[in-house]
Image (tube, grey):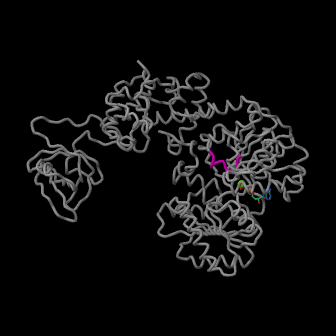
């Protein structure tokens, strides 16, 4: 029998070019796709529920005799049909109905209907049920299985999708859909055969546990989630292997530059910085490319660690690229590295997307001719950027880049042959279980110590009805020589509205705080304007900075010790933590006021309470994960990183250790199964290992 993956959907009855096009929109091109297009939920049309046993909210099949059908006037004209079955009375209500419909529902007609039961003005009601009049003599069968409801797109009906899956299921067997999990593995982890799991999920029997299915805890879902996670693991491992097989420049430990750097730095590295620094230094001395993730809470001092890594490459005569996700952050790095490297006689080049014309051409020329240190945004990924002798790529705040982008820079090594070492720094503390899965291709170092002299930020949760008091507090702090941030959060995902709100707040606060110098920074300003405002704030010419979340990462002004965050309930905890990390960087006691808009939901209250109770990014990440689930915590920024069809990292976290072991075993004993699995689950350029 042909493998279903090799059969186009057009082989199914009723599928022509037009329908095939619609199917392609939901990712259905071949019959294997149809099988992996799993229902979102199910309806139970397998039994007739007595009217007396109906509960509001339930979707049910009901059968009864029409006791009366009247057009009633109410707020809107409707047809109200009363149905009785001996156990009770149910009303069917139609707001749109034809004369023929009304005639067909005459008193005494036997009707079978399906719909959602709701409490109505006349007892339980179903609005616009699906229904059919029964002609008496012959009993009509109920459905034999639960009814699947598939994800769909416009113009593609559930009925059509059901027909297609029906036809495909008829062709399903162990040969048409090979099971790439060998029997031994499946037995060891108690996984059922693939075709059984697929069949079950498309057509669950009447006694299936709907609750288990809804929560994704069913054995059939487990079977598929396991395979999907395993495949994800394989792809990252394969990626890792493909990188490890390449050559990177081995760079000896640096002696001179780090000493000079330390002498000018003004502080000594923490123990954690030294330890992580040594781990990196060792990696860099090897000819295998380094792939290392440094996790360190906000303010832990990752930049210094990056600088030491850079110095090792620079002393060996190579080039280093440092990339940050936003222009503000990249610019701060550019300023820091210029300051640090100038006394060492090393030049720093700058490249960002907004750099145009001559400036851009000259930056590209600098990079191509071998300027030692290059700092920029993801503009550094672009094809036209050619490095002369790139040996180390440093990516800051990795959570904004996906796997694909990580890969793009790896290919910019010397002459495209040598692979650069790679250092990734993130302040988004990722719970261990997730890190294992999301970063299986990386080694990890943790900066688990803050520089000395930091005082934890005191966080208060305050209703915005007390705004005036808060403004006074800002005035007091600034009059005492301190500086403050006032952060306006995202409005309905619209950057433009958010920037407008920041402008309004800026005007209001400038008026309210006459005598203080207030600045404004938001994403719609020109880079040069932003840089000028940041510089003024850094130098203390501005006392209050009104900002959008553009200041979320990297901004470093130690004298700022007060932060107001408006509508903190709109942000994720990780993001709040990042923002709050802008204060508490100097020796003065710092405060963060979370100015929420009442009423808060229960979840909202819980979340803000976590912020008040702890400043530890790892605890916050764990709690955030518990409350919201991983997709949301990591946000859409994680594109390409954590998107699964069946699996859910939070729900299936307990599977991850077995998945890792299973991936290992599979690679050892059945390596030839890896490619078909990748083929099945990761399509169209998602196959990390094949770049
Ligand atoms: P992050 O890990 O959030 O990127 P940064 O690298 O921006 O942190 O460092 C935060 C601040 O701490 C900076 O002002 C930096 O100069 C300072 N810093 C870093 N390491 C030390 C240290 N060992 N001792 C004192 N201050 C330090
Ligand atoms: Mg940083």
Q: At x 78% / y 57%, what residue is drawn?
A: 335
Compared with 266, 365 (above or below) is above
At which x and y percent is residue 520? 65, 69
In this view, which residue lies farthest toward the top?
Answer: 1
Q: Would residue 502 be seen by someone viewing this image from the given angle?
A: yes
At which x and y percent is residue 173? 39, 23
Locate residue 239 relative to residue 284 in the image: left or right: left
The residue lying toward the viewer, choosing from 662 and 418, is 418
At which x and y percent is residue 688? 61, 34
Locate residue 251 relative to residue 82 in the image: left or right: right
Q: In what quadrant does ligand 1 lie?
A: bottom right
Name the image quarter holding residue 252.
Answer: top right
Locate residue 93 relative to residue 383 in the image: left or right: left
Instruction: Magenta stretch: give its range.
Output: 395-401
Name the image quarter holding residue 233.
Answer: top right
Quadrant holding the C terminus: top right
Compared with 502, 70 (above or below) is above
Q: At x 54% / y 34%, what residue is drawn?
A: 684
Compared with 31, 565 (above or below) is below
């Amino acid at each position: 029998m042909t493998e279903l993956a090799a059969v186009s959907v057009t082989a199914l009855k009723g599928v022509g070019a037009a329908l095939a096009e619609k199917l392609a929109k939901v990712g259905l091109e071949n019959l294997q796709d149809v099988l992996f297009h799993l229902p979102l939920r199910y309806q139970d049309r397998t039994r007739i529920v007595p009217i007396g046993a109906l509960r509001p909210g339930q979707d049910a099949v009901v059968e009864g005799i029409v006791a009366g059908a009247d057009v009633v006037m109410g707020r809107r004209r409707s047809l109200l049909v009363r149905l009785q079955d001996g156990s009770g009375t149910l009303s069917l209500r139609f707001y749109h109905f034809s004369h023929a419909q009304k005639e067909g529902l005459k008193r005494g007609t036997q009707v079978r209907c399906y719909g959602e039961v709701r409490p109505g003005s006349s007892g339980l009601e179903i609005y616009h049920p699906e229904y059919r009049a029964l002609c008496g003599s012959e009993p009509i069968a109920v459905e034999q299985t639960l009814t699947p409801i598939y994800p769909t797109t416009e113009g593609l009906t559930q009925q059509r999708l059901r027909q297609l899956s029906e036809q495909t299921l008829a062709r399903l067997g162990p040969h048409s859909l090979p099971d790439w999990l060998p029997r031994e593995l499946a037995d060891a982890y108690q996984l059922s055969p693939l075709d059984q799991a697929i069949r079950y999920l498309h057509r669950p029997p009447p006694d299936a546990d709907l609750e288990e299915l809804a929560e994704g805890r069913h054995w059939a879902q487990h079977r598929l989630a396991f395979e999907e996670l395993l495949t994800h693991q394989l792809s990252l491992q394969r990626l890792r292997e493909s990188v490890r097989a390449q050559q990177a420049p081995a760079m000896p430990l640096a002696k001179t530059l780090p000493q000079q750097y330390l002498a000018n730095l003004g502080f000594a590295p923490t123990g954690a910085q030294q330890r992580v620094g040594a781990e990196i230094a060792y990696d860099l001395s090897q000819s295998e490319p380094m792939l290392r993730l440094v996790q360190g809470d906000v303010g832990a001092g990752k930049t210094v660690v990056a600088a030491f890594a850079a110095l090792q490459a620079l002393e060996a005569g190579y080039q280093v690229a440092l990339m940050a996700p936003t222009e503000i952050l990249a610019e701060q790095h550019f300023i820091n590295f210029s300051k640090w490297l100038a006394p060492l006689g090393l030049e720093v080049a700058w490249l960002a997307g907004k750099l145009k014309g001559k400036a851009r051409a000259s930056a590209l020329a600098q990079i191509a001719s071998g300027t030692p240190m290059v700092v920029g945004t993801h503009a550094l990924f672009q094809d036209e950027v050619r490095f002369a002798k790139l040996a180390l790529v440093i990516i800051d705040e990795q959570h904004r880049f996906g796997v694909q982008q990580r890969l793009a820079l790896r290919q910019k090594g010397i002459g495209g042959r040598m692979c650069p070492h790679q250092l990734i720094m993130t302040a988004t503390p990722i719970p261990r279980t997730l890190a294992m899965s999301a970063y299986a291709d990386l080694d990890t170092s943790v900066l688990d110590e803050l520089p000395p002299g930091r005082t934890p930020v005191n966080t208060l949760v305050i209703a915005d009805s007390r705004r005036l008091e808060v403004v006074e507090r800002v005035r007091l702090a600034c009059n005492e020589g301190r500086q403050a941030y006032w952060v306006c959060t995202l409005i309905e995902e619209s950057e433009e509205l958010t920037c407008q709100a920041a402008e309004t707040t800026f005007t209001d606060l400038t008026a309210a705080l006459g005598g203080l110098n207030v600045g404004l920074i938001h994403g719609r300003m020109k880079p040069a304007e932003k840089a000028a405002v940041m510089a003024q704030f850094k130098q203390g010419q501005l006392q209050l900075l009104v900002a959008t979340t553009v200041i979320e990462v990297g901004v470093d002004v130690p004298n700022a010790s007060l932060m107001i965050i408006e509508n903190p309930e709109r942000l994720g905890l990780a993001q709040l933590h990042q923002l709050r990390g802008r204060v508490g960087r100097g020796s003065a006691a710092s405060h963060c006021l979370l100015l929420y808009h009442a009423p808060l939901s229960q979840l909202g209250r819980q979340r803000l309470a976590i912020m008040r109770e702890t400043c530890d990014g790892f605890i916050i990440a764990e709690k955030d994960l518990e409350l919201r689930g991983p997709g949301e915590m990591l946000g859409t920024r994680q594109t390409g990183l954590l998107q699964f069809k069946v699996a859910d990292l939070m729900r299936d976290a307990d599977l991850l250790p077995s998945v890792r072991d299973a991936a290992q075993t599979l690679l050892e004993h059945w390596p030839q199964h890896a490619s078909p699995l990748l083929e099945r689950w990761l399509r169209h350029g998602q196959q990390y290992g094949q770049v």
